[in-house]
Amino acid sequence: MSDSNKNWVPVCDAVELQPMLGVRALLENEQVAIFRVQDQLYALNAIDPFSNAAVLSRGIVGSLKDQIVVASPLYKQHFNLATGVCLEDDTVSVKTYAVREEGGKIQLATN
């Protein structure tokens, strides 16, 4: 689906998103962690599936095994920011979202 066919919802101002630091937003009752890394935007569900706590927006961003990841602050599992797959257990993943910056706003797609 092209970006023009998606329903984009603004969730925060782009200035609130600092490089390598997460922001948590609410999209249709889902908590989403949003990151800007090297001018690329990523969005994934903020709930750590191992602890069921909404902590991924507070995780440490880095590179591991040639992948850009966020490390959960609780049990330290690493999640690929582009795919949501856990590096330590590829049977576990978190949902990812289409994200873009438009007119100074960070937007997430609802479909």
Image: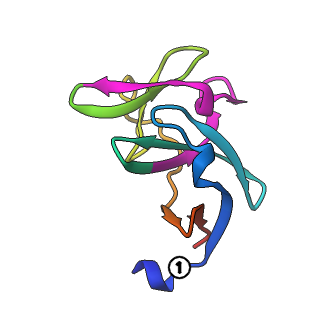
Q: Residue at x 53, y 50 (%)?
A: 95
Tell me if residue 26 comes above or below residue 74 in the rendering.
below
Q: Position of residue 43 (x, y in %)?
A: 52, 49
Is 64 left, or right, of 107 in this rendering? left
State the residue position of label 1.
Answer: 6
Residue 79 in view here:
yes
Segment tinted magenta in the rendering: 42-64
- Quick one: SS at disc 1? loop
Q: Position of residue 18 (x, y in %)?
A: 53, 38
Comparing 13 with 95, the one in front is 13
Q: Position of residue 19 (x, y in %)?
A: 46, 36
Tell me if residue 12 comes above or below residue 77 in the rendering.
below
Q: Residue furthest right?
A: 29
Residue 1 in view here:
no
Tell me if residue 62 comes above or below residue 107 in the rendering.
above
Tell me if residue 100 comes above or below residue 17 in the rendering.
below
Q: Quadrant of the C terminus?
A: bottom right
Q: Is residue 63 magenta?
A: yes
